[in-house]
Image: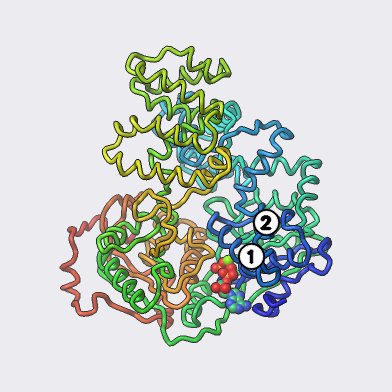
């Protein structure tokens, strides 16, 4: 096979593993450092399985994000084309079961809903909806009034989510991760009980439920057998960032491990705040008898040798590590840069200048990326990019769907789909003038009791202010509920109904209207309302330089991304913002050793995204955008502790702007220094 020639011996062994006898592939673990070709090997393996005769419809491919899924499918198709020619397209399309854990869970649950006592028309709550429902329940139980200190809705949701995903008792989660909430254990238990009940009554699932129900389903032997029979091969990338629930799904899915391939790198485990555990990958080989086949990869094909050496040096100081250091054959005389700048503005200036110079030299904007610890860190840069007319797409920041007007329209559709979904119902009903939470609740109760949209709505006497809109509202909701308009015309109907309310609510309604047009375009690519709602909720498009629009698909644009969202990707040039203590490691995560270690791995992930150029930005002062302990202000900064002096030999030091003396640089300071903040910045106390 031509495509196997591209691989090194170990990669090839991984790709060919078990392909001689497809029904008897022992479990396989590929564990290796960044850029060693893990994802590439996985794509080759999928292609090779299919070329060797495996049925693509019986392969499940689990990746971390929608973007990763699309990228993987593209790679698989390209490889298969070499072996199968024009047939490859159809074969790749038949790989229908590829997606994130959550998306695959949602699909299986719809299909198996009747077997597990779920109603198939369930709607899915995103984090914001879940927090809203948590809040409704909190109010119902009067906890919000009880005492001011009772945890806020987002904290409640975080605690709940943590307990579910880590499969850990509440008390332990509180003691370990949320000690300041431990005194509320009994109330939280009641709250969570009521929250679960509310979800059931309303036939909604939150993100965690998609895993939880799936895991539960795997405990039913008949269903687990059924699923195991349905899929011959299950392959997972980025296994180091799965949590216990996901591992238990997998191990019950393929209890013998036959046909199971997992891929990961313990040095890149960066999601423990979502209860991911690196133990999953470390425990994998020993879980099966006979043991899983273990393959390690040692060559990095991504980065130049100096970039890799610097990244290796950073991760070498990690306290616990399994994967070995990599080597790279890509020589270069260019050391990665530690760029000293005065502040946020200078940081943005340096980046823009270098990005434009790179573009002059032939690098597309798309092959360059700016990475940061927290979404708000890129604010100044975004302003500068906009001013200089440089288009960009931001990953991991504000999502298209988080814009209020988009959420409103989707709530209309979601409510029509599942009238028991109270969060959606509340949102929609309160769009009407004169309807507040109290009236909305009565309306929703009425609908739940009568069990019919039309009857529930018709039977309701609206307050006077809403009377003029009532007839139209009832007709629209009834049509949508019955699905009478058909998909995707339903979206147009919802938008048409919503438009007058949008015009009243938002000054920039005209701009928002173009978003609705874009939403309609997106909708047209989904076969049904249900698929549209599910998949959009699970993986919404990212925001662009227009703030709320979906990505500009064909144009050239710069990538702005949180480090977390940059996982698995690579760019020719990478700029990392604020490589200073307080940002990396974040001042929110500098308590325990495990937290610090995770921040170190985060820096390693950021550095290993770069192929040819790496710039670590070190501002002398940085602006804390609403950071919990500091508020909005400038604080003095020091280079991250993860790059101590002894390590600087791996870098070239740059000062920018070059010609400016220190005093000239100081003149660009635009806000007065706050000494108190400086102290806090240095010692982290208040
Ligand atoms: P990460 O840990 O960041 O997810 P990874 O181990 O998954 O990285 P890939 O993204 O698969 O690595 O590969 C990194 C780069 O190396 C890609 O550009 C890929 O095409 C290239 N590559 C992988 N294997 C080879 C090979 N044998 N020969 C040439 N290039 C390769
Ligand atoms: Mg990868």
> Residue 95 — which label?
2
Q: Tell me residue 616's x, y (percent).
A: 38, 71
Quickly name the residue at label 1: 76
Q: Is residue 141 visible?
A: no
Instruction: Look at the numbered disc 1 and give the secondary structure of its residue.
Output: helix
How far apart are the two marked residues, 2 and 1, measured between alpha carbons? 10 Å
Instruction: Look at the numbered disc 2 and give the secondary structure of its residue.
Output: loop
Mark 2–mark 1 CB contact (< 8 Å):
yes
Nearest to N terminus: mark 2 or mark 1: 1
Q: Quadrant of ligand 2?
A: bottom right
> Residue 462 — which label?
none
**Can you tell which quarter of the image residue 531 is in?**
top right
State the residue in front, 227 or 667. 227
Neighbor class of circle 1 (other Cα within 10 Å; few <14, some 14-19, many 20+) is: many
Q: Which residue shows up at 48% across the image and 64% down it?
A: 602
**Can you tell which quarter of the image residue 578 is in?**
bottom left
Q: Tell me residue 112's x, y (percent).
A: 71, 38
């Amino acid at each position: 096979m031509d495509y196997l020639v591209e691989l090194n011996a170990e990669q090839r062994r991984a790709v060919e593993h078990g392909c001689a006898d497809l029904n008897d592939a022992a479990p396989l673990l590929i564990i290796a450092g960044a850029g060693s070709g893990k994802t590439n090997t996985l794509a080759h393996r999928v292609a090779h399985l299919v070329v060797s005769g495996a049925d693509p419809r019986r392969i499940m491919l689990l990746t971390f994000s929608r973007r990763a899924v699309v990228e993987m499918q593209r790679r698989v198709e390209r490889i298969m084309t070499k072996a199968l020619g024009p047939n490859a397209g159809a074969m790749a399309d038949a790989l229908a079961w590829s997606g994130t854990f959550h998306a695959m869970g949602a699909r299986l649950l719809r299909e198996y809903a009747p077997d597990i006592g779920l109603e198939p028309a369930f709607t899915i709550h995103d984090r914001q909806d879940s927090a809203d429902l948590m809040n409704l329940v909190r109010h119902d139980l009067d906890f919000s009034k009880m005492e001011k200190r009772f945890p806020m809705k987002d904290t409640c949701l975080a605690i709940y989510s943590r307990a579910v995903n880590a499969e850990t008792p509440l008390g332990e989660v509180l003691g370990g991760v949320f000690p300041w909430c431990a005194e509320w254990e009994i109330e939280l238990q009641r709250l969570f009980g009521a929250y679960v009940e509310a979800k059931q009554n309303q036939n909604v699932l939150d993100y965690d439920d998609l895993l939880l129900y799936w895991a539960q389903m795997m405990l039913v032997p008949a269903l687990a057998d059924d699923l195991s029979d349905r899929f011959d091969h299950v392959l997972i990338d980025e296994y180091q960032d799965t949590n216990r629930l996901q591992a238990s799904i997998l191990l019950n899915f393929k209890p013998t491990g036959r046909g199971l391939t997992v891929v990961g790198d313990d040095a890149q485990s960066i999601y423990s705040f979502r209860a991911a555990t690196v133990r999953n990958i470390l425990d994998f080989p020993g879980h099966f008898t006979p043991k899983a086949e273990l393959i390690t990869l040692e060559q990095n094909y991504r980065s130049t040798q100096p970039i890799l050496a610097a990244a290796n040096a950073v991760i070498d100081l990690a306290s616990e590590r399994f994967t070995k250091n990599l080597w790279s054959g890509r020589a270069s005389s260019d050391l990665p840069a530690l760029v000293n700048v005065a502040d946020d503005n200078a940081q943005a200036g340096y980046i823009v200048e270098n990005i434009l110079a790179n573009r002059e030299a032939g690098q597309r904007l798309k092959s360059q990326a700016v990475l940061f610890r927290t979404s708000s860190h890129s604010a100044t840069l975004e302003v500068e990019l906009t001013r200089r007319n440089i288009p960009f797409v931001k990953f991991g920041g504000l999502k298209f769907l988080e814009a209020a007007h988009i959420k409103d329209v989707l709530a209309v559709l979601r409510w029509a789909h599942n009238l028991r979904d109270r969060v959606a119902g509340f949102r929609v009903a309160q769009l009407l003038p004169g309807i507040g939470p109290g009236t909305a609740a009565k309306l929703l109760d009425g609908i739940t009791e009568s069990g019919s949209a039309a009857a529930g709505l018709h039977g309701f006497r609206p307050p006077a202010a809403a009377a003029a809109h009532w007839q139209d509202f009832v007709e629209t909701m009834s049509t949508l509920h019955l699905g009478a308009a058909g998909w995707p015309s339903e979206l147009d109907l919802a938008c048409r109904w919503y438009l007058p309310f949008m015009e009243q609510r938002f000054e920039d309604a005209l701009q928002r209207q173009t978003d609705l047009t874009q939403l309609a375009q997106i909708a047209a690519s989904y076969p049904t309302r249900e698929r549209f709602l599910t998949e959009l909720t699970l993986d919404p498009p990212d925001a662009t330089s227009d703030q709320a629009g979906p990505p500009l698909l064909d144009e050239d644009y710069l990538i702005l991304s949180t480090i977390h969202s940059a996982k698995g990707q690579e760019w020719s040039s990478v700029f990392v913002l604020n490589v200073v203590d307080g940002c990396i490691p974040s001042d929110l995560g500098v308590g325990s050793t495990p937290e610090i270690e995770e921040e170190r791995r985060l820096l390693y992930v950021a550095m290993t995204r770069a192929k040819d150029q790496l710039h670590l930005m070190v501002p002398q002062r940085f602006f804390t955008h609403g950071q919990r302990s500091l508020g909005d202000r400038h604080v003095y900064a020091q280079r991250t502790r993860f790059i101590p002096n002894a390590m600087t030999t791996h870098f070239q030091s740059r000062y920018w702007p070059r010609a400016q003396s220190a005093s000239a640089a100081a003149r660009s300071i635009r806000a007065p220094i706050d000494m108190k903040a400086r102290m806090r910045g240095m010692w982290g106390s208040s």
